[in-house]
Image: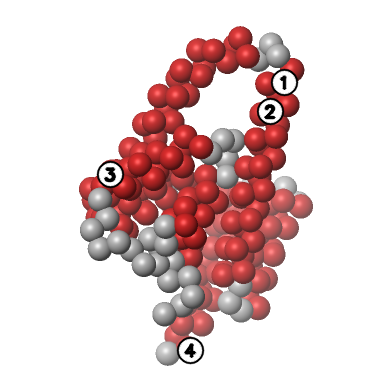
Amino acid sequence: MEPDAAKPEPHLGLWQIFSTFTKISLTSFGGGLSGWMMREFVQNKRWLTEKEFLTGLALAQAFPGVNVVNLSIWVGYRLRGGAGALAGAFGMVVPAMVVAVCLVAVFDQLARFPLTHVILAGVAAAAIGLSLQMGIRAARRAVGSLVSAAVMTATFLAIFVFGFPLLPVVAVMAPISVAAAAYRLKNAG
């Protein structure tokens, strides 16, 4: 068993899934949700392995829609099937939506204070740090070969440094990456 192996509870309840996603959705601001989810489900609760989580994250990013909602559906499904997927999605979306609607009603008043903007900038910096931490972990796992490292580096450079549009870059790099992974699996077995 790998060192970060999950030890799921035998009878993980839907309420546990819902309340865990509710906690994440209500305590994460300005992004970084994927990092928070990884910390909660892999490191704290150990319901998933890091490899399982990163697989779900890759799938969530490949599907249309909001990545963290896709990921909450995947995690919930992985833990308890269809009912778990609903519990995960509702836990991620509904409580945060209720709070957001309430905050929008008062934000106009708060926006007048300079401290509000300072606080939001601090929260955004922390969220970027969480995202960066998760990205570095994912990159370490993804680099299984020289080709994987080259694809990851080329994708980063094309989008971040050269400013190429995301969809064309993915359309070119994804097939290369999939072919390299298939080749590696074929020759490993």
What residue is pinned by disc 2? Answer: 119
Give me the residue at 65% from left, 71% from top.
149
Q: 158 or 138: which is nearer to us? A: 138
What residue is pinned by disc 4? Answer: 187
Q: Determine the CA span between mark 2 and mark 3.
A: 32 Å
Query: As displayed, is residue 66 above or below residue 170?
Result: above
Q: Secondary structure at mark 3?
A: helix
Question: For residue 115, which numbered disc appears in the image?
Answer: 1
Q: Is residue 32 left or right of residue 94?
A: right
Q: Determine the CA span between mark 4 and mark 3.
A: 44 Å
Q: Determine the CA span between mark 1 and mark 4.
A: 58 Å
How busy is the neighbourhood of tag 2: few (under 14 within 10 Å), some, or many (20 plus)?
few
Measuring from the top left, give residue 7's x and y in whole percent: 36, 67
Q: Secondary structure at mark 4?
A: helix
How busy is the neighbourhood of tag 3: few (under 14 within 10 Å), some, or many (20 plus)?
few
Measuring from the top left, give residue 112's x and y in whole percent: 69, 11
Q: Is residue 57 visible?
A: no
Q: Nearer the viewer, mark 1 or mark 4?
A: 1
* Mark earlier in primary sequence (4, 3): 3
Give me the residue at 43% from left, 40% from top.
23
| Badge 4 amino acid | Asn
Contact check, label 4 and label 2, Cβ < 8 Å: no
Q: Secondary structure at mark 1?
A: helix
Query: As displayed, is residue 162 above or below residue 43?
Result: above
Question: For residue 15, which numbered disc appears in the image?
Answer: 3
Count of residue discs: 4
Q: Nearer the viewer, mark 4 or mark 3?
A: 3
Q: Secondary structure at mark 2?
A: helix
Question: For residue 24, which numbered disc appears in the image?
Answer: none
